[in-house]
Image (tube, rainbow, N blue to C red):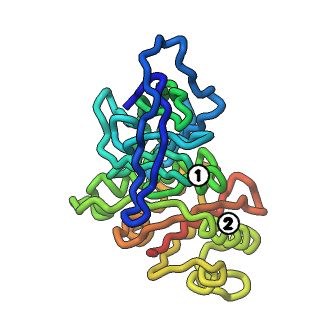
Amino acid sequence: MLFPSCKAVAFRCGVLGLSIFMLAGCEEASRQDTAELADDEIEVSPKAQSSNVALVSSVKVRFASGVAVAGDSSELKVLLDGKEVDGVVTYSERQHQLTFQPREALKPDTRYTVQMADVLAYDGAVVPAQQWAFNTTGAVGMTAQWVLDSCMSSDDIALLAAINNERESGVGCSGLPVSPAPALSWHCDLAGVAYEHSADLARMGVVGDVSSSGKGVVERVSEAGVVWRGVAENTLVTEGEGALVAMDAALSNFTQCENLLNPALTHIGVASAPSLAGAEHQFWVQLLVQQ
């Protein structure tokens, strides 16, 4: 709640570990007499107008110094089409950070609005009300923001979203209705293993699960340090560079389709390498694991 021209004093009860905020020297004052924190003393995440925001993101507001808050949705709200998103608001005194954690993953390809108000700094300065918006990325499952930023291209994001849309469609490889499969998440190390094998296949000019050194998919994935309970691999060659072309080719092959739509598998990495005989041919590896 906002109290103009009030000085906030914090006391902590040692036994209960509770913070109690008392207001001292409260006086009626005009708006122009009330100090405000500068914008550069407030850091928000996701940033205003940012895109490609992970579906597992929380909303955070970090202050340059401590603030007096109740830690509830009256201070920090996330809105979708004008309606509040269900979530939990918490405040960290150590980090001076107000956090909104959605109870469910954010929706893909969606614009969210954030509102913050009724926050008072310890020195009595009013934290100006904030409102900003951000856009989420495609259907990338539980893929974390650092994965999106560090090892995924826009083509990778589009491919993962397309695969997850197929998994969500409720149509099995036989064309019969099935239960929708959970969305896959991207795995940086799997993509690295997939690239190494695709380049190896391109050098050999063959398609298969065994590398030139005689290593199968289990050995290659394990040597990369990937923790897994189940593993599957699709290898194929296509004309053209498009990853969606390779996805469609795999979906038309019953065994490879079952790998892509297997509800038990949780993570994927995909990569390709051009044929040495002609760049128009691409050797693809789609590598999936259950973690």
Q: Secondary structure at mark 1?
A: helix
Residue 245, how many percent across, how many down? Answer: 53, 51
Residue name at image x 48 percent, y 76 percent: 232
From the viewer's perspective, is 213 left or right of 109?
Answer: right
Nearest the viewer among 221 and 199 is 221
Question: Looking at the image, can residue 27 be seen?
Answer: yes
Question: Looking at the image, can residue 115 be seen?
Answer: no
Residue name at image x 69 percent, y 52 percent: 280
The quadrant in which residue 265 appears is bottom left
User: Which residue is label 1 attached to?
Assistant: 148
The quadrant in which residue 28 appears is top left
Disc 2 to disc 1: CB gap under 8 Å: no
Q: Assess disc 2: are there few (<14), some (14-19) or many (≥20) residues with their C-alpha within 10 Å of its C-alpha.
A: many
Nearest the viewer among 47 and 255 is 47
Label ID, residue 232: none
- The answer to whether residue 240 is above or below residue 124 is below
From the viewer's perspective, is 109 left or right of 159?
Answer: left
Q: Assess disc 1: are there few (<14), some (14-19) or many (≥20) residues with their C-alpha within 10 Å of its C-alpha.
A: many
Please, what is the three-letter code of the amino acid marked with disc 1? Leu
Residue name at image x 32 percent, y 40 percent: 85
Residue 267, how many percent across, how many down? Answer: 48, 66
- The answer to whether residue 119 is above or below residue 174 is above
Marked residue nearer the N-terminal end (2 or 1): 1
User: Which residue is label 2 attached to?
Assistant: 195
Image label count: 2
Residue 69, how many percent across, how many down? Answer: 42, 41
Q: Secondary structure at mark 2?
A: helix
**Foreground mark, 2 or 1?**
1
Residue 42, how many percent across, how many down? Answer: 59, 35
Please, what is the three-letter code of the amino acid marked with disc 2? Tyr
Nearest the viewer among 276 and 179 is 179
Q: Quadrant of the N terminus?
A: top left
